[in-house]
Amino acid sequence: MDLDSLAQRLDYAVRAMDESTDLAKFGNLPLVFDLVRQILLQPEGCALVEARAESLEKAGVFAGSDWAEPANLLPSLTTLSLQSPNPDTVIIESLSELRLLAVVRGHYLHPSISAEQAHHYLTQVLAINLGLLFGMTGEAEREQGKLALISQHVVQHIAQQIGYEHVIDSLVEEIWRILQQRPIQVGDVRKMITQIAICRAEPSVDLGNAGRGADRLISALYGPTRACSEDPGIVVYQQRLETMDGQTLQNEATGFARSMHDTGLVSPYHACFVRYILEEGQDNLLSEALGLSSTGRDCLMCYRELVYALITEGIFPETAQGLYGLALMLERGILYQPPVAPALWRQARLNLCPEARERLQLAYGYQPQAGAWLIQGVLNMLGQPLGVGQGNNPTCQSARALSMWAYNDPDYLLQMVAWAARDNEIIMHFEGQPVSSAHSLGGVASEVTLDLDPVSLVVVPHLDRIYGEMGRMCIGREGDPHRWVNPEFHGWSAGRGFAINVDVATGNLHDLEGFIRHFYASYHPYYNGNQPLIHPQPAGIAVTDRAARFIGWHAITILRVALDPEGEMRAYFYNPNNDSGQSWGDDVHVSTEGCGERFGEASLPFEQFTSRLYIFHFDPLERGELADVGEEELQQVMARVYRSWGEGRIPATELQAEPPPAQ
């Protein structure tokens, strides 16, 4: 049904609701909410609903609810409502925000809130919902499905109407928080920075003191060095390069490297500079332009021809971000592993199948050619193995596998890329049986979206189908299929031992205390003989929201367990969900910086991490005695479980016993 027809039906429904008795109003509400939902799913629908905000409120859509008095609303609670899995909650919150926008714009003279108060409220809503504003999604949005589109449309419509300049300071802080995690996909960050730059350049927009910390971000993209500081354009900058002497070129190289490593962002001018120095025989400046240490310089000298080929084939102004991956890959020294360099030579010359080429072109366009985008993606994944994100897809298993291979088994990753991109098929094995991505019945995701890095874009659809097929091969087995699938899917380094604290048949908790003691014995240095974790291990967590409510099961990788700078034992882990810095409720706040994290790591105190864990792997040949964890710490972990995702999961046989008290 088109938008005009829906609007007419909504007008009739609102009129009928307004004319009905108080008791009958509730009977009309479902139809009104359903029509609003259909309208808001379309980007143009927000304006239609905003124009009807006054008639909607007077008809009684907020009557008897928490939204009845807008002066009493709290901006901090909008995140929970907009990300709720309940359609009615999302709709009424959206209606409330659009009502306040109508007040701000003078279309609705509200009896209990002024335009100034409504404006202040909405700026706070924008500031704390920046992810929705720029289409950045996490677990809650994935669980919402299409409902998440409504929340995004509403927040984006509000920002367009009241101006981005009112959230600039929050925007800058959010950008630096995301960049600290060094994601591979920085398209959303670039959008944010571009929006700030547009606001600052607009004469009619008065930012006042806002956005003072944005200069470094804007310059990182649009003018990181003296010769391009005013963003002259690639053509002009190319002409300037041709007139520079050796010292000026040296200064440019140093400036580009400093900006890149400070922010994790690469300017298109940087790619232009690197291509120029290679074409003009100034390759002695390459290590300076990449900001390499002695380790990276040695690796560059040993594999100079390969590096030049990768730059020639894969680095253009559009794919400049690959330079950061290249620099970090050289610093890792993985080219010294015998299979990696030949595999990268293959990648540089790889002929893409039509299916892979089409996906890359749909996501990134036709310039440069698709192979260049894939080379950029390979460089970034090998340089930033913890920067892989799953996008808006339920494919955390596949994203985790790519990250683990890039981290621990880079030549295997390159083999997967070659199979997927060249042959449009990946064949893995499950307990000796070949599993083909071309012949599987389908994966976890009905359709893999295009909001992914180039490697994930090509490889994840195949991995997801294989993962789904392996799960189907476990049908009929007792227990959780991850017991068998994870080691076969992720490779030999994943422990064959398996522990789970949930009974699969009932969903109830099972031997929680034994699970906790076993995890401490396997991973905590004070209980496992101070043995560091050797290979990253797949694990499963119960994701909770800010209110500690259960959202769903999620795949992560445990990377290491160590003391943080304050002397607290922390678990450091990789989370593929695009943004690791989250609040999981009950004072469990995932940290991504300041607690000893390396780029891309998330961390929690060991006790808090254990309280969200439901699956882990271990080596069954290691000593398996349960850890003698102190009673107080044990009770703290169990109490956190019962207060969050474990609520309602206590078996009936244990209900007689009181759950551990809160500490």
Image (cartoon, helix red, strand yellow):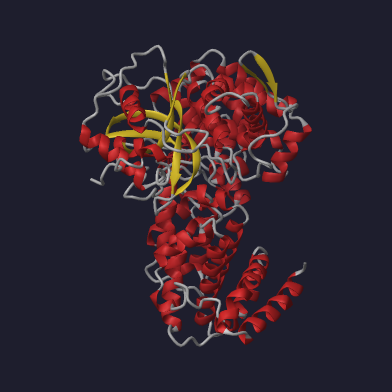
Does residue 153 sit above or below 32 in this rendering?
above
Quadrant where the N terminus is found in the figure:
bottom right
> Which residue is at 52% across, 34% downward?
505
Above or below: residue 23 compared with residue 624: below
Q: Nearer the viewer, residue 107 or 336?
A: 107
Name the spot of residue 252 as percent of width and height, x first: 47, 42
The reply to whether residue 1 is in sight is: yes
Q: x, y (%) of residue 451? A: 61, 45
Which image quadrant for residue 214? bottom left
Q: Residue at x 47, y 55 (%)?
A: 218
The reply, left or right, for residue 404 in relation to residue 73 is right
The C terminus: image quadrant? top left
Q: Is residue 263 among what the camera can see?
A: no
- Left or right side of 565 for 142: right
Q: Residue 518 placed where, x, y %? A: 34, 24
Pinpoint residue 340: horizontal percent, then vertical percent.
56, 18
Q: Is residue 256 above or below residue 334?
A: below
Q: Quadrant of residue 34?
A: bottom right
| Residue at 59% across, 85% down | 21
* Closer to the camera in the image, 659 or 621: 659
